[in-house]
C-alpha cells in the first residue's frame, strides 16, 4: 500500500498504542530534523492511547536534541512518553554481515512488540552514508543503543544489509515520509532545503522508500538497504497519481560515487 497526500493534509493514523520512531539527525537546529507541525496532528489523534516517542543518540546529544527540536514540550502536551535508547535498549539482536560475520546489537524491545504500531517518520534527506535517508534506516537505526549503531558501519554493503535485516524483524509499521521539504546536497547538516509538498504513507517502509526515491529522481536500485530488503532489485510498481505529478530530481551528496561502490563490493 502506497498513498500520497499533499503536505500537511490530515493522515489516516490508526488509533492504537504506538511507538513513534523519528529520524532526528542533529542536536543543533537543523532543517533535517522532524517538523513539529507534522508530528502534532499525529499525537493529537492518538490522545488517550499509550504513545511513546524515540530516536537514537548518545545521552548528552539526546537531551539537547529533545529541547532544540521542541519534542520534550510536544510530548508533554499530548501525554506521550520519551523513550531513551541509551538507557532502555536492552533487547538483543544477532545479525549477520554479507561476509557471514556475526554482530550483536541492543535495541528497544518495544520496536519488536507486535501489539504496538510503529509510526516511523522521516524527512527525505540526501545523506553522506546512506544516499537517501528515508523510513527504513529510521525504523532500524533509531531503535538501537547509540553505541551499537556505530558498530554497523563496517563497510557500505554490510551497513545496508544490516539496516534491511533489522527492519525485517519489525512488525506493524506505518511509514510516513514528511516530504513538504527535501534536504538536498550534503545533508543532513550541510544540505539545503527544497520544497516538494508531498507526504508518502504506507505500511511497508521498503515500498514507501522505493516509491519516494523514484519520485525524487533517485534509482531505488542504487539504495542498498532497499536492495537487501528485496534480495535484489525492488519490484517495479506504479506510483500514486500525486507522486507521478510531483516528480523531480534532487541533488545528491557530493560523495555519491563512493556510496555506489557497495554494488562492486
Image (cartoon, helix red, strand yellow):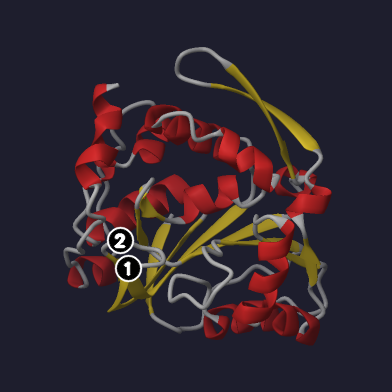
Q: Residue at x 32, y 68 (%)?
A: 191
Q: Secondary structure at mark 1?
A: loop
Residue 242 sits in which quadrant?
bottom left
Q: Is residue 250 above or below residue 86?
A: below
Residue 107 placement (x, y as % from top left) = 72, 42
Q: Is residue 167 above or below residue 59?
A: above
Per the rendering, the mark at residue 186 is 2
- Residue that label 1 marks: 191
Instruction: Locate residue 79 relative to residue 29 in the image: left or right.
Output: right
Instruction: Locate residue 222 relative to residue 29 in the image: left or right.
Output: left
Residue 139 placement (x, y as % from top left) = 57, 50
93 or 65, which is in the foreground?
A: 65
Disc 2 or 1, which lies upstream in sequence? 2
Crowding at dot 1, Cα within 10 Å, few <14 / some 14-19 / many 20+, comes out as: many
Q: Where the C terminus falls, by quadrant?
A: top left
Q: Where the N terminus falls, by quadrant?
A: bottom left
Per the rendering, the mark at residue 98 is none
Residue 137 placement (x, y as % from top left) = 49, 48
Q: Answer yes or no: do the residues labelled 2 and 1 have beta carbons within 8 Å? A: yes
Distance between the alpha carbons at the discs numbered 2 and 1? 5 Å
Amino acid at each position: 500500500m502506497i498513498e500520497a497526500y499533499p503536505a500537511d493534509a490530515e493522515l489516516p493514523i490508526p488509533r492504537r498504542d504506538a511507538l513513534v520512531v523519528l529520524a532526528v539527525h542533529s542536536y543543533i537546529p537543523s532543517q533535517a530534523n522532524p517538523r513539529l507541525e507534522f508530528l502534532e496532528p499525529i499525537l493529537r489523534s492518538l490522545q488517550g492511547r499509550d504513545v511513546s516517542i524515540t530516536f537514537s543518540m548518545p545521552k548528552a546529544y539526546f537531551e539537547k536534541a529533545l529541547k532544540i527540536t521542541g519534542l520534550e514540550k510536544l510530548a508533554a502536551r499530548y501525554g506521550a512518553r520519551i523513550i531513551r535508547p541509551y538507557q532502555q535498549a536492552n533487547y538483543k539482536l544477532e545479525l549477520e554481515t554479507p561476509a557471514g560475520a556475526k554482530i550483536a546489537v541492543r535495541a528497544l524491545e518495544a520496536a519488536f512488540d507486535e501489539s504496538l504500531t510503529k509510526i516511523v517518520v522521516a524527512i527525505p534527506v540526501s545523506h553522506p552514508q546512506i544516499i537517501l535517508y528515508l523510513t527504513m534506516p529510521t525504523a532500524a537505526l533509531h531503535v538501537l543503543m547509540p553505541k551499537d549503531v556505530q558498530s554497523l558501519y563496517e563497510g557500505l554493503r554490510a551497513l545496508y544489509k544490516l539496516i534491511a535485516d533489522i527492519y525485517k524483524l519489525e512488525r506493524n509499521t506505518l511509514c510516513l515520509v514528511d516530504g513538504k521539504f527535501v534536504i538536498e546536497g550534503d545533508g543532513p547538516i550541510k544540505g539545503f532545503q527544497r520544497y516538494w509538498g508531498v507526504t508518502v504513507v504506507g505500511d511497508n517502509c521498503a515500498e514507501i522508500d522505493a516509491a519516494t526515491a523514484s519520485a525524487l529522481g533517485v534509482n531505488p536500485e542504487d539504495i542498498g538497504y532497499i536492495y537487501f530488503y528485496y534480495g535484489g532489485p525492488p519490484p517495479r510498481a506504479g506510483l500514486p497519481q500525486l507522486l507521478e505529478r510531483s516528480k523531480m530530481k534532487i541533488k545528491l551528496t557530493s560523495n555519491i560515487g563512493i556510496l555506489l561502490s557497495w554494488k562492486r563490493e
